[in-house]
Amino acid sequence: MKMFFIIYSTDIDRQVLITLKQSGCKNYTQFENIVGVGDSGAKLGTAIGPGTNKVVMILVEDAQVKDLCVRLENLKKSFLRKQGLKVIVLPVEQII
């Protein structure tokens, strides 16, 4: 099992959630109004860094990992302009 952290611009929330659904991922935790600075620029919720990010945290069975990674990579490539979308995948040792 893997833990995915999907960090993305609020602007693409709908596309990310559709991608999760298409991959068969039903359960997730979403964090809203996340601020920070990354490769796609500053998202600080201010005039200097307009906009915010969201983070989806989701447990993914090993059999689904490759499919979800491919779908998220294709989503990132589909945008005409640079959108913030970063995916971090970590191993899960134990769930209590």
Image (cartoon, rainbow, N blue to C red):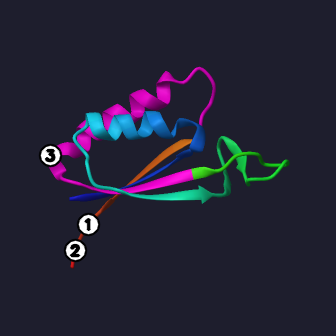
Marks 2 and 1 in Cβ contact (< 8 Å): yes
Q: Secondary structure at mark 3?
A: helix
Report the residue at 22% width, 41% height from top.
24
Type of amino acid at the residue the image marks with label 2? Ile
Q: Which residues are magenta?
A: 54-83
Q: How many marks?
A: 3
- Among all residues in the image, which is located at the extreme right? 48
Report the residue at 66% width, 58% height from top.
35
Tell whether position 78 is magenta. Answer: yes
Of labels 3 and 2, earlier in sequence is 3
Tell whether position 75 is magenta. Answer: yes
Q: Which residue is mark 2?
A: 95
Rendered location of residue 8, percent (x, y): 54, 45
Type of amino acid at the residue the image marks with label 1? Val
Rendered location of residue 45, percent (x, y): 74, 53
Of labels 1 and 3, earlier in sequence is 3
Label 3 and label 2: CA atoms lie apart by 18 Å
Q: Badge 2, how many Cα within 10 Å: few under 14, some, many 20+?
A: few
Q: Secondary structure at mark 1?
A: loop
Q: Which residue is mark 3?
A: 63
* 10 sits to left or right of 49: left
Q: Badge 1, how many Cα within 10 Å: few under 14, some, many 20+?
A: few
Label 1 and label 3: CA atoms lie apart by 14 Å
